[in-house]
Image (cartoon, grey):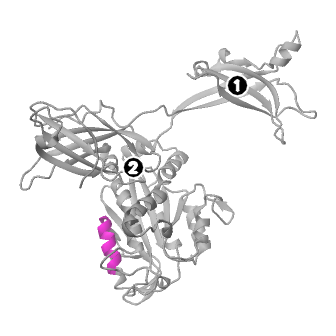
Amino acid sequence: MAGLGASEPGTGPGPVPATRVELTVSSHYPHCPQFGRTEVIDNSLNPDFLHKFVLDYCFEERQNLRFDLYDVDSKSPDLSKHDFLGQAFCTLGEIVGSAGSRLEKPLTGIPGKKCGTIILLAEELGNCRDVATLQFCANKLDKKDFFGKSDPFMVFYRSNEDGTAIKVEVYDWDRDGSHDFIGEFTTSYRELARGQSHFNVYEVVNPRKKMKKKKYQNSGTVTLLSFAVEAEHTFLDYIRGGTQLNFTVAIDFTASNGNPSQPTSLHYLSPFQLNAYSLALRAVGDIIQDYDSDKMFPALGFGAKVPPDGHVSHEFPLNGDASNPACHGIAGVLEAYQRSLRHVQLYGPTNFAPVVNHVARSAATVLDGSQYFVLLIITDGVISDMAQTKEAIVNAAKLPMSIIIVGVGQAEFDAMVELDGDDIRISSRGKVAERDIVQFVPFRDYMMGGPGAGLSMAGLAREVLAEIPDQLLSYMKARGIKPPPHSSHSGSPPPHP
């Protein structure tokens, strides 16, 4: 008999989940809280478990999972009474980010023995995500303005809990907010869904006028001209449809960071702990790498004198290969960063535009929604090329691209807040950015130190990554790109070969 237990290591209070996903599990022959168990399947080396685990999914959080497989020998709930067959570790993002949200992993845990494989499948639980777009026209509405005609607008109310009846009020807009009531009518979603027809011409009635005047008929009519329903797609729809996140890192090598050989430097490589640059890179990269299938990440530096001639560069490859600056995995990026510190001379100024334009050139070649580019800039200082960077960001806002800026050290980061554009959308030469694509976070806000440092890095990752799903959706929506349909199935993995 085979049974499976699922656990969530190190989970705790976190952000509001973006959505809920359902995990389906199948199998081929540190302490953490147990999340749940599957049913037991008798005498099978290739069990397909029917029990599904429902989890809250958050893109910006690393959600670790562990799956343990047992051969059940009795009815005892105590797992120590049963034979351990193997286990697998992964993150929820790893499952979701795999092709078709289907991940196959080897079972391990018994030295010298092949334990088989486990197949994990994630599906977003469906809520109604239909968006209805309606167009109306009105005829002979009561005049409410002393001079000229009315300036009408409508307010829609759901008039009962099941949403079947809809009440619509019509008003004449006034600048001072004291809008004049013209009248009202009721309808239903079913009626509106019929589209333009004689059923969807409504008399606008003012109840007070109707009570006072015997000959009162109405205060005008409202006619439905069109009705269209479209599904509102989610971030997971695109990821499951094959959209890849391409992650690029750009690191500040300006002299204001301090001499890397000195412990006071932000680039100091201590044998005992990671510096701020490495911590920020790990916090963001460890999550976003789950959505990039080849795990190859371009890594750039800016603001240093580089060999062999010592010229100042603002987009040099950390791995030394200008034709292919990609490093294998986040570990490869960290290794290339540390190697660069030994070969370049920290200099200046702090220019962002070259690395923004570097990624934008790549993003401009893939506009079909199959790839989305995320640039992480880690910097310590005041930006030197503000005008050029703003122009680069405004141009990049038209592309499938987001920018994360993490500020390390104790400098003032006022310019970064301006680039963030949460309050005022960034503009350049009179042109306003189409989308808000920049998120800035000061690293010092998450430096708790001591044993809590790990938790602070989780907080940093949540803060800088929280906007990526909506930014991706805003690009897809603006370009009218729909996710490719994935085949519907009952939730069970494909049959075994």
Asked if 445 appears above or below 88 in the picture, the reply is below
Mark 2 is surrounded, within 10 Å at the Cα level, by few (under 14), some (14 to 19) or many (20 or more) other residues, namely many
Instruction: Please determine whether, in this image, residue 217 is positioned above or below residue 109.
Output: above
Residue 188, given in percent of the width and then of the height, sits at 61, 20
Asked whether residue 483 is in view, the answer is no
Is residue 102 visible in this depiction of the protein?
yes
**Span of residues in magenta:** 327-339
At x 60%, y 73%, the residue is 386
Residue type, mark 1 in image: Val
Secondary element under disc 2, as helix, strand or loop, is loop
Q: Nearer the viewer, mark 2 or mark 1?
A: 1
Q: Mark 2 sits on what residue?
A: 243
Q: Position of residue 436 (x, y in %)?
A: 57, 56
The N terminus sits in image quarter: top left
Q: Residue at x 53, y 64 (%)?
A: 440
Q: Quarter-wise, where is residue 69 in the image? A: top left
Residue assigned mark 1: 168
Which mark is first along the chain, 1 or 2?
Answer: 1
Q: Is residue 24 depicted above or below 422 in this figure?
A: above
